[in-house]
Image: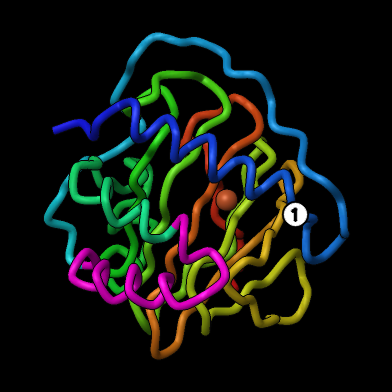
């Protein structure tokens, strides 16, 4: 089931290189990628399912991504994506998440404690949102970066206004900084990475939502 590990490691390095070549679109800060830290494999943080409903939008998202600035990386993602394990955060359930969100979100790890490249940090992988999906406000201790691959979505940080993001944009979330995303008529595909050790289940939703 696992993607060819050498190809995935090359692609992982290429993606982090693209991240370090950019600056955060909001603050202008540069990203320092931590050295890889080893860990034991464990799968409890994620609910794995390669038949998640949102995956019907994956081909469209990859085709969109291949028309923009990060096309080279997007095309490489296309070659490994079918072999990745897609998942949802095991903490996100019907008790704390809307059915539209659960039907519209998936994540496939490249690196992490439950990913093909086994490490505690840096974690990284692909986030897919379907059209007309809101990923409600949430926050977590590990600092995070998003590298956008598709057009047409919006971001919200802290208590601020929603703003447009574009392919090639880099967005940094500081420790415990509230963030939310939403899509309209197009799916969203992005590479998401954590710069610090952390557990996906420790992500907290905003008390009031966004
Ligand atoms: Fe996050």
Q: Nearer the viewer, residue 198 or 170?
A: 170
Q: Residue furthest right?
A: 28
Q: Is residue 209 visible?
A: no
Q: How is the image coloured?
A: rainbow
Which residue carries the number 1 mark?
Answer: 22
Q: Nearer the viewer, residue 155 or 98?
A: 155
Give the magenta range. Answer: 54-73
- Circle 1 — which element? loop
Q: Nearer the viewer, residue 61 or 204?
A: 61
Q: Is residue 110 visible?
A: yes
Instruction: Label the magenta part by its dominant secondary structure.
Output: helix
Q: In the figure, residue 201 lies in which quadrant?
A: top left
When the figure is inspected, residue 173 is found, relative to residue 119, above or below; the finding is: below
- Cβ(mark 1) to ligand 1 < 8 Å? no
**Residue visible at 12% across and 56% down?**
51
**Residue visible at 29% across and 25% down?**
43
Q: Is residue 155 left or right of residue 97?
A: right
Q: Is residue 199 left or right of residue 171?
A: left
Q: Is residue 185 left or right of residue 169?
A: left
Residue 173 appears at what percent x and percent y?
A: 71, 51
Residue 202 appears at what percent x and percent y?
A: 52, 36
For the N terminus, the quadrant is: top left
Tell me, yes or no, whether the highlighted magenta stretch contains residue 84: no
**Residue visible at 36% across and 81% down?**
131
Q: Is residue 113 left or right of residue 38?
A: left
Q: In the figure, residue 89 lies in which quadrant?
A: top left
Residue 161 appears at what percent x and percent y?
A: 75, 81
């Amino acid at each position: 089931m696992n993607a060819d590990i050498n190809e995935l490691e090359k692609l992982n390095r290429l993606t982090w290189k693209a991240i370090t070549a950019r600056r955060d679109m909001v603050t202008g800060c540069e990203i320092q990628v931590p050295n890889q830290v080893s860990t034991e494999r464990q799968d409890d943080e994620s609910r794995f399912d390669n038949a998640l409903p949102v995956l019907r939008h994956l081909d469209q998202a990859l085709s969109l991504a291949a028309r923009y600035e990060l096309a080279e990386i997007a095309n490489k993602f296309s070659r490994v994506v079918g072999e990745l394990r897609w998942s949802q955060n095991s903490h996100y359930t019907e008790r704390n998440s809307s059915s539209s969100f659960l039907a519209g979100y998936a994540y496939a790890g490249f690196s992490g404690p439950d990913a093909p490249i086994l490490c505690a940090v840096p974690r990284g992988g692909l986030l897919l949102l379907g059209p007309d999906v809101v990923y409600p406000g949430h926050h977590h201790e590990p600092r995070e970066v998003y590298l956008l691959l598709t057009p047409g979505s919006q971001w919200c940080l802290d208590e601020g206004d929603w703003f447009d993001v574009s392919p090639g944009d880099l967005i940094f979330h500081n420790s415990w900084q509230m963030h939310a995303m939403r899509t309209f008529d197009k799916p969203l595909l992005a590479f998401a990475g954590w710069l610090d050790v952390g557990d996906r289940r420790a992500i907290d939703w905003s008390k009031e939502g966004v």
